[in-house]
Image (cartoon, rainbow, N blue to C red):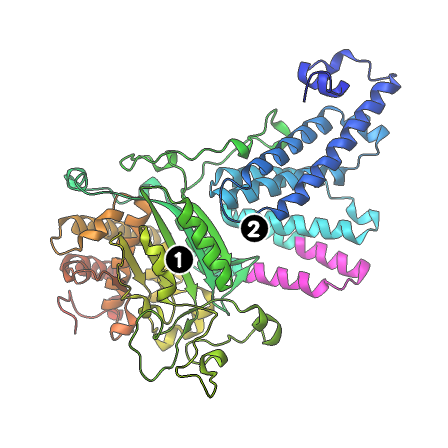
Amino acid sequence: MTATSLTPTDKLAASGNYEYLNENNDQEFEDKIVEEFTHLLEKSKQLFNGLRDLPQYGHKQWQPYFGRTFDVYTRLWKFQQQHRVLLDKKFGLKRWQIGEIASKIGQLYYHFYIRTSETTYLNEAFAFYSAIRTRAYYSKVNREEKPDLMVKKLRYYARFIVVCLLLKKTKLMRELVRELNRQIDEYVKAYDPDDSLEWQLVLNEISTFIDIDNQLNVDHTPITLYYRLTNSLIPPLPNGAEKFLSNIQLYSLEEILIIGNYQDQIKFSELTLDMYRMLQAVERQPIELTASSEDRTTMQSPANHQKEVPDLYDSDSSKRSNPHKYLLYKPTFSQIYAFTASAFKELPTNGVLLLYISADGYDTHMKIKTAHSYDFGGVKTNNRRDDVNDNLNSPANTLGKKSTSATTTTATTATPIKDIHTIFPGDLYPFLRKPLFLIIDSNNSIVFQNMPNLFGQPLISLLSPVKIPAVFHDYQNKGSLFTLFLTSPAFAFCFVCHLNELTSEQWNLCQENVNKIIFEIIRIFLKSKLVDGMIYHFFGDEFLRIFLARFVFCYAVLRLHRAFKGSGFYPSSQPQLSNDLLENVLVHKMILELSASLNIRQLFLEGPLTTLE
């Protein structure tokens, strides 16, 4: 825009000389202000609606448009702050309209967090959502007698709750749930809307989600579990490790796909419990902001986001960027392939792709199985037609059931037809051209254990147990045990030991000892001469290093636990980890000592164990 094409208010904005104009009696000035505000308001709505048409994957395609949208909202927000009295008088600006602008800015920040994985933007979203509530921008919406405005208010509450959920603001979140409950009651009473059952479902989902995620009581009070990475959780590399690893090509975690497709698992919004836990486990704990949206003279534009090159030996993790991730809730096969291909394309030279899949298993039920690529089954994806035709509360085509498409044959069909809505090991072969860290949490995870390393790139698969003891069957919809061990090993230990009531001393003791065990496992990893050399390529990244150590901890705990009997109850990996890790006497001894200190020694075998029985 040239200087001659600037509007009077643009020129004033550039010079900062609004105060020199007579705002009391200058009708022309007032008209210009209203005109400019109307222009910015319409432009912001137009750009915001256009965000829906942007591709959900890829980095470069959407960022320029997003930046333009944010810039317009920045101007709009500052403009209404500077001229609120005049706009109230001449435009009839209402508080709910200010709230709507703040809500849109909060949404922009939240969606930029989703696209970049940078938790700083979550704090920015929280600041704007919090300002809406503190300043009661939506307080008089009920008087407008417009159901669409009430829906806007309800959606604001739902979005605010999601942000609080991700920032672990549990107390505020429970207050918001109670407020949302009252608002839904008022909405239903006033308008008897068609979507009343949908809003009740939203309320039930979030209430259940919060209760399940906070089921451990310490000193008779539910505690908030934290899954994000902090400096205290990062296993330190022992002396000499840097010299040892300097001779190895190290890779860093850069791209992540988190896929949740368990049919019956508890969820809120488009997050299952497994997805919710894993997405935080690949993030660093954010630094909270203190300034409210109203107090800021400038707003941080996400358009200026630049990803830093990680320093693999930097001890302060808060300085490093989070790896980029995609969250896919019950995606189709096509969606999984498109997003994986995009992440694969964006992967830098030294980058690793982490593919995490939490899903029901699928078995081909073939009598003769020879090819590991497709004959042994895989994990289910979403079939959109099933969403319409099947009962949503009953899982379709899980491991125990034969798929309709898997058994369909014709007179000319020589071999059984496999389910097209399944991810088979062979489907991942094209992506083995670059380093891949695979985590499969499924009752058919074992089929991914023998994937051939076709291109010689670093590859590791961490696979969940395929069986669980009967005593835990009723908990399957409340999050997977394997994912729990990978994201919160101390709580997972308590869970398998049926410890849901602890004193603060016991809980602190448990966390401290689990951390010591994790650190010891890292030391053994680097000391062992039997570990497959490919694993060390992933050791430079703190997220992947922790997942590997927690995997070994999970194996050791389940191996010692009396309720878990047989190899199907233990996690597995590719390449297989050596016995000096999985059956380590010192690790077993530390676990048994922890169980004794918590008065649950009887739940574990006599040990330490040295060989697999």
Tell me where residue 220 appears, x and y as whole percent.
Answer: 45, 57
User: Quick check: 372 left or right of 385?
Assistant: left
Pointer 2 local density, CA inside 10 Å: few below 14, some 14–19, many at least 20: some
Q: Residue furthest top?
A: 20
Occupied quadrant, residue 495: bottom left
> Residue at image x 13%, y 66%?
610
Tell me where residue 51 appears, x and y as whole percent.
Answer: 62, 44
User: Quick check: 67 left or right of 554?
Assistant: right
Q: Is residue 91 above or below residue 180?
A: above
What residue type is disc 2 on?
A: Val
Is 27 in front, or is 421?
A: 421
Visible residue check, residue 388: yes
Residue depth check, mark 1 versus mark 2: number of the one nearer the observer:
1
Q: Is residue 467 above or below residue 114?
A: below
Is 212 included in the stretch rendered in magenta?
Answer: no
Tell me where residue 445 appears, x and y as whole percent.
Answer: 34, 68
Q: Is residue 217 above or below residue 140?
A: below
Disc 1: which residue: 356
Q: Total number of numbered labels?
A: 2
Tell me where residue 344 appears, x and y as whole percent.
Answer: 40, 50
